[in-house]
Image (cartoon, rainbow, N blue to C red):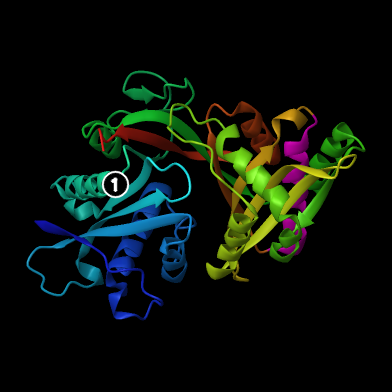
Amino acid sequence: MTTTVLEAPPVPPSPDHPDVWAYAGYNRLTRDLEVELLGHSDRWAPLPISLAFLTDSDWQRSILLVAVRDGVAEPGTDDVVGAAEVRIPLRDNLRTGHVFVVVDERVRGAGTGTALLERAEAWLRAQGRDHVIGWSTVAPEPEPGPGTLEAPTGAGRVPSDDPTVAFLLGRGYRLEQVARASQLDVPRDADEPRRHAALAAAAAGADYRVLHLDAAAAQDHLDALARLHTRMSTDVPLADLRVEEEVWDAERVAEYVADYERSWQEMRLAVVEHVPTGELVAYTELQIPAFPEIEFGFQRDTLVLREHRGHRLGMLAKAANLELLVRERPCVRRIHTQNASENEHMLAINVALGFRTVAVQAGWQKGLGAV
């Protein structure tokens, strides 16, 4: 089958809009890929949520490229056999682009992925970007030895004969980092996370206390949260990915919090206050789809400011947040997260809380030449 690459219309205002066909086709492909790789679709965003995620903001712009069957005058959802989501930051990292490509398994190997990637890279060059970063999933992580490609960091690996790995290597991408994707089967009661939180609180001492913030309460701490988000952008292990510090201020945090509601997500934020100074010195964030019947959620960022590390604040924040979730949202049965494979300290916290490895995420980078 031969295909043509088109740029999708702007993100439509609702799933019922006539221009939604490209986004609905992409949404179907991403769900199929998640089921193919992981056996479930927890990480997949239904179409209304996906549209919200793809909508431009003051901090980010994205386009969607779709590959459709040749000869179709008015393509529809079922004619989409491949797609590339392309993003650029607008306030920082102004030479960086991000791309994610997915192709229907029935047409792989016929050039559709290459056509999408080349078009995505050309668009990024036109936007003044000189390098591109992308991620792919492998499940399970292979054992060390022949037939594997090791991350340059020395932590994590992918099978060298994986089709996506071979595809990206063949198009000039370099493996920079491997992240561990983990899943927590949420305990039925809060006893275990409560025990971890109590032990961590004892180690931290009276100088530190946990505060729980919902979206409304976060409005009272926007400047402090901006500082934490800024530090988060570069304090985590980044291998040789060309990522610069992100610029966060109160306005950006307020917009970030509002995005949760717009995309039907619930934010559960635990922060650690340094009592003598009143400074917020650590935070962790859970993202839960805001539907009562949903059984899964996502562990997002966790950060302890470097100058306050060594007091078990990462465990304190994560265990306290998990304890509250178990008590207030007992329907949530699974939490998904990912961490750089070289981030031994945070991974040890996850393992202690019960997370288990289910896959790895490979971080790829390519230079786009002079712009």
Instruction: Give the secondary structure at mark 1.
Output: helix
Residue 24, image x, y percentages = 33, 69
In front of the other: 228 or 90:
90
270 or 331: nearer the viewer: 270
Q: Is residue 87 left or right of residue 257?
A: left
Quarter of the image containing the C terminus?
Answer: top left
Kindly identify which residue carries mark 1: 124
- Residue positioned 73% across, 57% down in the render: 326
Instruction: Estimate the x, y position of residue 80 in percent, counting from the top left.
Output: 22, 64
Q: Residue, x 66% and y 64% (percent of image)?
A: 331
Q: Is residue 187 visible?
A: no
- At 29% across and 46% down in the image, what residue appears? 124
Q: Residue 15's x, y, as percent?
A: 39, 76
Q: Residue 184 appears at what percent x and percent y?
A: 61, 46
Badge 1 local density, few (<14 within 10 Å), some, or many (20+)? many
* Vertical placement of residue 50 versus 363, above or below: below
Query: Is any part of residue 34 visible from this angle?
Result: yes
Q: Residue at x 58, y 61 (%)?
A: 255
In the image, residue 37 sits, relative to residue 65, either above or below, namely: above
Say left or right for 195 vs 358.
right
What is the quadrant of the N terminus in the image?
bottom left
Q: Amino acid at mark 1?
A: Leu
Q: Is residue 62 left or right of residue 110?
A: right
The region drawn magenta spans 311-330
The overriding secondary structure of the stretch rendered in magenta is helix
